[in-house]
Amino acid sequence: MKITVIGTGYVGLTTGTVLAELGHRVACVDKDPRKILTLRDGRVPFYEPGLNDLIKKNLGKNLEFSTDLDSAGESEIIMIAVGTPPAENGSPDLDFVLKAALESVPFLNGYKVIVIKSTVPVGTRRIVEHVLIAGGADRSKFDIVSNPEFLREGIAVWDSFNPDRIVIGSDSQKAAEICRSLYRPIECPVMLTTNEAAEMIKYAANVFLATKISFINELAGICEAYGVDVKEVARGIGYDKRIGHHFLRAGAGFGGSCLPKDLSGLLSMARKAGKKALLLQAVQEVNAGLPELIVKKTEDLLGSLSNKKIAIWGLSFKPETDDMRFAPSLPVIRLLLQKKAVLTAYDPIAMDNAKTVIPDSVSMTSTMYEAAKGCEALILMTEWDIFSKVNLKRLKKEMKKPVFIDGRNAFSPLELEKAGFLFTGMGTSSMTTMEAGFLRR
Ligand code: UDX
């Protein structure tokens, strides 16, 4: 099939490239000429493992990049995959989606399926339909499919080839079938539903994941008070198939372009409908309180932070991405600077992006050891693999005081304490119950 994908962010670019790899002819369109030049050169404008190779493989064959929508004239499918950033009131800003729809109107010269990939509030399909008709489109020339995307950054290519499910929402059987055939070679449950249910499924999925994280983070605080290791509790409850082990890692909380935005999006939908959504508010509050908790833990160990040199390890919102959107490191850095701490930071991939959102007073270093040099504490904010390979002896030598605040529970408290560090995690005791039992024997 011939497909035009509008928007070359994480979702649009990965989906477009994967569809090309599946044998479709794909044109990816973006307004930003610099981005298009980079892509035509076979380079990805952001860090996403595996995507570069796949683009290079398909470029000039099944995959092309353009700043104009001309390819849409020949396409059977126009896929809208532009951003829906949160507006001031928390509801997603639909401007880019509606603009993309309007700009597609001149190309609706025969029957086409408009696929909405972007995460949009329930009812957006109807708005898009109005916009198309108001823009002069003939209603018989298009149908709209709501086909949300569930890929995770950092593992986006794998997720696109191996989704847990594909959700296709449409009131047109014909459009739903066309959309379904796009993904034909992929084996997974395919769910056909209404546009509105598809729109809601995306929010419900992300908000449920956010709820799991806030649940475990709240539990972490209670565990800590009773000297119980939250990691063990997560493992123990996770064996229950109804609960599962995923998304129960306590730590600095959820960030990124989706979970925080979709949580405020659903809250805003609830507000508009006159619903209280108490649980969702709590999920948001628990997450918002974590940066303060991390700073308090640091103060508990160091006393006043004024003029104290502190290292931040990891800046991106999670490993394997350079995305800084809603990264928990940002509020932690802001709070530490308010308390007049002197900060150094290291991230293996995200430092260039971080420089655009972090004050210049934070000095970025070229190695993790350099960041720790002369510091009185080190705060781990992103659990990049490289940090787990650290030589603790060397790290201790570099630091002025060996104080380690593990904001991601990535390290074994026992191992760090054995190496002479003063350690605190997020709901982890200095000795796990298992380790303690082992030692008692
Ligand atoms: C998420 C959804 O997982 C994906 O399905 C959707 O399409 C987009 O949003 P993403 O934002 O890429 O994906 O990251 P994800 O891996 O879900 O992590 C989100 C945040 O939660 C990160 O900040 C991560 O560090 C945090 N997290 C995740 C935890 O704090 N604990 C966990 O157990 C899991």
Image (spheres, rainbow, N blue to C red):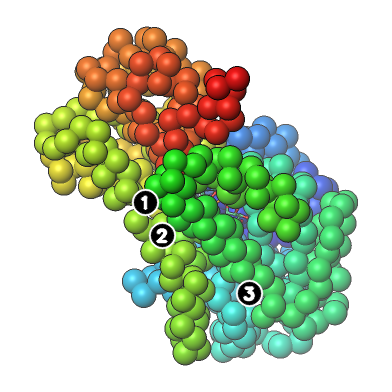
Of residues 114 and 415, which is closer to you in this image? 415
Q: Position of residue 311 (x, y in %)?
A: 29, 29
Above/below status of 114 relative to 426? below
Marks 3 and 2, the one that precedes in the sequence:
3
Q: Position of residue 407 (x, y in %)?
A: 41, 39
The residue carrying mark 3 has its beta carbon less than 8 Å from ligand 1: no
Location of residue 132 (image quadrant): bottom right
Location of residue 400 (image quadrant): top left
Identify the mark at residue 200; answer none if there is no mark. 3
Q: What residue sits 49% from the left and 86% below the top? A: 275
Q: What residue sits 59% from the left and 88% below the top? A: 130
Please state, as top left, top right, bottom left or bottom right, where the N terminus lies in the image: bottom right
- Label 1 and label 3: CA atoms lie apart by 28 Å
Q: Quick check: can you spot residue 82? A: no
Q: Which residue is mark 1?
A: 290
Element at label 3? helix
Of residues 415 and 313, which is closer to you in this image? 415
Above/below status of 296 relative to 306? below
Of tags 1 and 3, the one toward the viewer is: 1
Marks 1 and 3, the one that precedes in the sequence:
3
Of tags 3 and 2, the one toward the viewer is: 2
Q: Dot 3: few (<14), some (14–19), or many (≥20) neighbours within 10 Å?
A: some
Type of residue at label 2?
Val
Above/below status of 84 relative to 308? below
Type of residue at label 1?
Leu
Q: Which residue is mark 2?
A: 286
Answer yes or no: do the residues labelled 1 and 2 have beta carbons within 8 Å?
Answer: yes
